[in-house]
Image: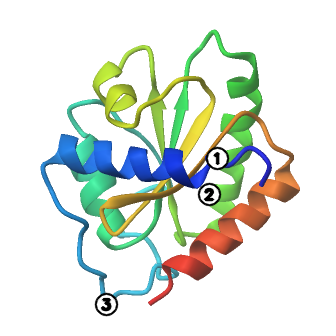
Amino acid sequence: MSRALPEAELSALKARFAAATGSAPAPTSAASPHAAAPSAGSPVIDVTDATFQAEVVERSLQVPVLVDLWASWCGPCTQLSPMLERLAREANGAWILAKVNADHNPYIAQRLAVQSIPMVVAIARGQPVDAFRGLPPEAEIRQWLSALLDASAP
């Protein structure tokens, strides 16, 4: 994907995230990331600074979580977020979409080293594994998701 973060940027993001969470990379889960999400709810959730650890980091030990960082004033966000929501519902639990209003949740934006939005960060096994910025075409997002799920498989 042309808008994916360069490897050096992704490595820096992983290091910053690990420092912020106070953890080393999480062990690989035996559960398949293609398994259905926990029965507790929707494949689309709203996340805040207070719920990030439980809803994103801990949940990512079971299934990949895509963190969609957006703001109400961001034009591309108003196009990307509904597309991601639709794709999450189509995926039927293969991954979770965690929506984060970057303006209202500065701690998450800081942890993920957000410099511009929209930005999507994939978290698997408790760590960021990939990310992209901007508004890529849906076909590119689908390819990115497919590669992410393949890479997350045990």
Which residue appears farthest toward the left when viewing the image?
22
Pick whichever, 16 or 101, lies toward us. 16
**Between marks 3 and 2 in the image, the one whose residue lies nearer the viewer:** 3
Q: Is residue 98 left or right of residue 22?
A: right
The x and y percentages for residue 1 are: 77, 55
Residue at x 28% of width, y 55% of height: 57
In the rendered image, which residue does mark 1 sit on?
A: 85
Is 80 displayed left or right of 140 in the figure?
Answer: left
Tell me residue 89's x, y (percent): 63, 59
Q: Which colour scheme is used?
A: rainbow
Q: Is residue 148 left or right of residue 16?
A: right
Location of residue 15 in the rendering, given as x and y in whole percent from the top left corner = 31, 49
Q: In this view, does 118 lie to the left or right of 41?
A: right
Q: Which residue is drawn at 58% across and 75% down?
A: 149
User: Residue flagged by tag 3: what amino acid is it?
Assistant: Ala
Residue at which label 3 appears: 30
